[in-house]
Amino acid sequence: MTSPWSKHQRLFATDPTNPYSGLSYRDDPAIFAIELSNEPHTSDYYECLKTDVGNKTYNSCASENPSQYKAGELVYSWLNDMSAFVRSVDSRHMITTGEEGYRTSHQDPNCSNKHSWINNGMKGVDFARNVALPHISFMTTHLYPDNWNVPTSDLDWFDQCIIQDRAALAAQHGKPVIMEETGFSEQGYDGKPDDYRRDRAYYLSRMYRYANKAGFQGTMVWQAAPLTLFDQVAEDDAFTFPIKVKANNQWIYSPEGLAMKQQISCQQNLARGMRDTSCISICPRGTSVDAGGLGYDPQGYRCAAVPGIGRV
């Protein structure tokens, strides 16, 4: 009987190696994990639209029960197949999905009725189902409130219905979860929330705080970049955070760079068993601070002003 992985196994017949260490990739301890895809999802309502071509519309799919057209099945099946294959050729490394964190349904009406597309199967991905895949070692989220058209006034909703919810689902299955990407555009979007752009460091800190309180095991960002010898950001897109900026002819941490630096210290403290209240985030612009540069953000959490660039 032909193995279901025979085609894939032929691709790996040469057992590719790391050209620097000479180690087989499957044995290389420098590799943290195998991510099956970057943001796997379908086109919007694909699974609904393909069930009855010519009669279904985007709007009709938005009101249809996702279970009727098996929303999330296509991505789930692909993740199941590929995670099984990767595990068959690599027994050492962790495997993750690389998904953003969408669901196909939600039991809480508050979470399913507001910004409904995130939890109604539109993207064809079901975090709640994918987390149970046997070969998936940990879960990921890629969270962009501004790009997702979530206003700053709904960030606490975002915390409850997305961040806390995904952390709880991962914990139910005994799996870690990482906020693998988060960030805010410096350019803004037509018709989308613009408050984030005006104070990216504060909102980045706030996303980190949400993740810490929810029990995420790690946080990352899209994207941090160093400066080149020509004082330019090494790799730039609208979501790039420069790690350092020049002020008074000196290089200092940018507000976003300081937020990332403080989050590293925070996660080290959390790993040592300290409470998340020991973490200090970045104050929003205009915050009154004491002589030590500390104040309180609008949620009542201790925060630090960014020195040297007139934030307060």
Image (cartoon, helix red, strand yellow):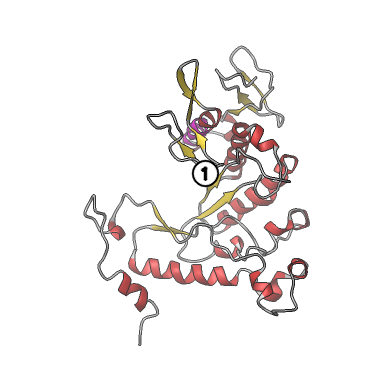
Q: Most extreme residue toward the bottom, as rendered?
A: 1
Magenta stretch: residue 249 in it? no
x then y, percent, for residue 266 = 51, 33
Q: Which residues are magenta?
A: 260-269
**Amino acid at pointer 1:** Trp
Q: Most extreme residue toward the top, as rendered?
A: 291
Task: Identify the image quadrant of the N terminus.
Answer: bottom left
Task: Identify the image quadrant of the C terminus.
Answer: top right
Q: Is residue 300 above or below residue 160?
A: above
Helix, strand or loop for disc 1 = loop
Residue under circle 1? Answer: 222
> Is residue 63 left or right of 188 when viewed as pictured?
right
Q: Residues within 10 Å of mark 1 (few under 14, many from 20)?
A: some
Q: Is residue 219 above or below residue 301?
A: below
Q: Is residue 253 above or below residue 123?
A: above
Q: Residue at x 53, y 47 (%)?
A: 181
